[in-house]
């Protein structure tokens, strides 16, 4: 029988392992908390925040937004949220957005959101009706107007748009492309092209807020588009969407040899 | 080995056999153009509280740069269970079928195209080299798309087909035919498409006479894109072959399955398989065959 007292070395090893596990767990928790931490960085007029099931309170700059919260703006209200990974979401007037999936998913109930997801950030996703727009680096605008339409405009980067209730119904929307569809759509239409410069000049979610971090990337896309317009690849049409009665007529009726079905369209 | 008109043909590939094998193994020698759904959407934008938030969206129209020339180079290879397409005593073999297609499709109107093309393909067998042959097609015709009828496409063209051996390009068979096709694509979703078609292949001159035939076929295909680069295709074709001589009529079914991986827009790797069954009012011409292989295809448009 061995009566020697147990060596202190294994105990120290166990303590060391325990400490390491605690440190890793702490780091993971901090990281998760950091990812989930989103703050209100701009408030213009009437903006409300809080869990949707409870009475919402007026939002203030610096306030935290948590998973499960919803934020809404009034008729003249606007707001900006900044996520821990520097993703930015700017809410237009009469906009309602909920947050889920650890703040990675924004549920756009109504209104318009300008989003700027920095390159290298985790995938950000905005869902509205059956349509989702996801990206790991892009700046764009998504608008839902009741049961009338959903629009996705991409200013820089690439956004994948897909239907959440249909496998394979997915397409990439590239800079300078606009996707316009009904909220209850069963098949996504092909995107059209729009003038990035004009949107940047007239968009209040750009003009009334500080410059975006992706401003230079957008300018670069604007420049590329100007070159294509100068070369005649793009012809500015007389179709401008800004109000009731504007005819939106995106015509490209020329048939071409069969394309295999693809999940990608665009340039 | 294949028996043609009651004659055993050991040692030399009969032209009729080459004709069948060219049809079965050809890398889609003749292009099958159909129409894509047109990109048209029409409606009125309703007033939105977010008009000023988004700004003005000036729609730009992209001018199409139409490229009428298509050059394809491909090299499928197969293991075939029945190299000579015979009813008994089947012998398997491996073959490679490199080919090149050059097609010119000038646009006459937005829905009306002319089409002129040349297809040259070779069929080299590993063991039964006496079956080696080459196939040349020269085509000229018209294609008409009808977007208003679910993107129906109608096609009519003349096809000059010449089968030769691969050593001296001595002629085995020459055929002149008029081919008429109608195709109707149905897009199930962005990533899936079903296509139905019918084709008439009417031979009006051939030499020698015995392999000459008219083909009446119905076909369908299903394509699904599982990712941006990977797609699966399945196609089935039912053909009645009415021969000009020997009171011979065959019924042929072809099932083909393929998986395609697009490395670049112009480069595709494929896994290919096809299965064919032939019934005839002369039992000696009945056969079944399975072909399994792969291939690489390079396609350039300019």
Image: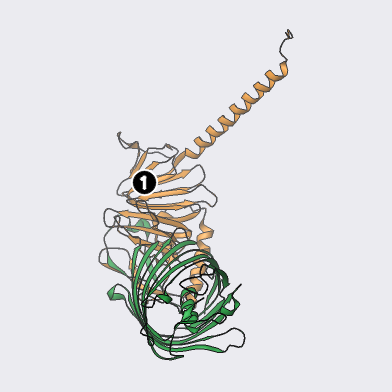
Chain colours: A orange, B green
Q: Is residue A131 above or below residue A85?
A: below
The answer to whether residue B227 is left or right of residue B130 is left
**Residue B186 location, quadrant:** bottom left
> What residue do we see at 27% from left, 59% from top?
B47
Rendering coords of residue A28 (x, y %): 55, 34
Of residues A223 and B196, the one nearer the viewer is B196
Give the secondary structure at mark 1. Answer: strand
Subunit bearing disc 1: A
Rendering coords of residue B63 (x, y %): 43, 76
The answer to whether residue A140 is left or right of residue A8 is left
Of residues B199 and A59, the one nearer the viewer is B199
**Residue A12 location, quadrant:** top right
| Residue at the disc numbered 1 | A107
Q: Is residue B281 above or below residue B141?
A: above
> What residue do we see at 33% from left, 55% from top?
B50
**Could one spot residue A77 in this view of the protein?**
no
> What residue do we see at 50% from left, 66% from top?
B272
**Could one spot residue B222 in this view of the protein?**
yes
Rendering coords of residue B104 (x, y %): 47, 84
Q: Is residue A182 above or below residue A21?
A: below
How would you rate the neighbour count of disc 1 (Cα within 10 Å): few for under 14, some for 14-19, many for 20 or more?
some
Q: How many marks?
A: 1
Rendering coords of residue A142 (x, y %): 38, 55
**Residue A23 location, quadrant:** top right
Of residues A224 and B10, the one nearer the viewer is B10
């Amino acid at each position: 029988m061995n009566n020697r007292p147990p060596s202190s070395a294994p105990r120290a090893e166990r303590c060391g392992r325990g400490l390491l596990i605690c440190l890793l767990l702490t780091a993971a928790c901090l990281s998760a908390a950091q990812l989930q931490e989103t703050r209100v960085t701009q408030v213009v007029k009437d903006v409300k925040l809080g869990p949707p099931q409870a009475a919402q309170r007026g939002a203030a700059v610096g306030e935290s937004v948590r998973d499960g919260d919803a934020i809404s703006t009034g008729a003249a209200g606007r707001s900006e949220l900044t996520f821990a990974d520097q993703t930015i979401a700017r809410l237009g007037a009469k906009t309602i957005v909920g947050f889920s999936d650890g703040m990675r998913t924004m549920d756009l109930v109504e209104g318009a959101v300008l989003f700027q997801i920095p390159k290298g950030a985790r995938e950000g996703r905005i869902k509205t009706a059956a349509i989702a727009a996801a990206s790991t680096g892009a700046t764009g605008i998504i608008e839902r107007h009741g049961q009338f339409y959903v629009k996705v405009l991409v200013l820089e980067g690439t956004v994948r748009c897909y239907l959440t209730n249909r496998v394979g119904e997915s397409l990439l929307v590239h800079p300078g492309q606009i996707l316009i569809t009904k909220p209850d759509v069963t098949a996504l239409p092909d995107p059209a092209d729009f003038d990035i410069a004009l949107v940047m000049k007239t968009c209040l979610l750009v003009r009334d807020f500080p410059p975006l971090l992706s401003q230079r990337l957008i300018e670069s896309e604007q420049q590329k588009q100007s070159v294509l317009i100068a070369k005649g690849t793009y012809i500015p049409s007389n179709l401008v969407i800004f109000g009731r009665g504007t005819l939106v007529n995106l015509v490209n009726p020329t048939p071409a040899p069969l394309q295999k079905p693809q999940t990608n369209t665009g340039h | 080995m294949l028996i043609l008109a009651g004659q055993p043909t050991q040692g030399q590939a009969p032209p009729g056999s080459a004709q069948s094998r060219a049809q079965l193994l050809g890398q889609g020698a003749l292009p099958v153009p159909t129409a894509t759904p047109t990109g048209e959407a029409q409606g009125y934008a309703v007033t939105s509280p977010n008009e000023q938030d988004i700004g003005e969206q000036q729609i730009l129209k992209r001018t199409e740069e139409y490229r009428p020339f298509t050059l394809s180079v491909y090299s499928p290879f197969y293991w075939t269970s029945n190299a000579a397409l015979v009813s008994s005593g089947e012998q398997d073999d491996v073959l490679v079928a490199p080919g090149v297609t050059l097609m010119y499709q000038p646009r006459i109107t937005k829905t009306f195209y002319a089409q002129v093309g040349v297809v040259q393909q070779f069929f080299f067998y590993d063991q039964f080299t006496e079956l080696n042959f080459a196939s040349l097609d020269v085509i000229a015709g018209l294609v008409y798309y009808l977007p208003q009828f679910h993107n129906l496409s109608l096609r009519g063209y003349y096809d000059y087909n010449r089968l030769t051996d691969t050593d001296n390009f001595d002629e085995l068979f020459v055929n002149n035919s008029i081919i008429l096709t109608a195709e109707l694509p149905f897009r199930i979703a962005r990533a899936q498409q079903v296509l139905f078609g019918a084709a008439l292949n009417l031979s009006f001159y051939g030499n020698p006479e015995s392999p000459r035939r008219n083909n009446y076929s119905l076909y369908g295909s299903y394509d699904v894109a599982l990712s941006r680069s990977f797609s699966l295709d399945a196609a089935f074709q039912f053909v009645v072959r009415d021969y000009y001589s020997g009171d011979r009529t065959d019924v042929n079914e072809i099932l083909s399955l393929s998986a395609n991986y697009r490395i670049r827009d112009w480069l595709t790797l494929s896994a290919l398989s096809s299965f064919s069954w032939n019934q005839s009012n002369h039992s000696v011409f009945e056969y079944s065959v399975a072909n399994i292989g792969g291939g690489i295809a390079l396609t350039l448009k300019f």
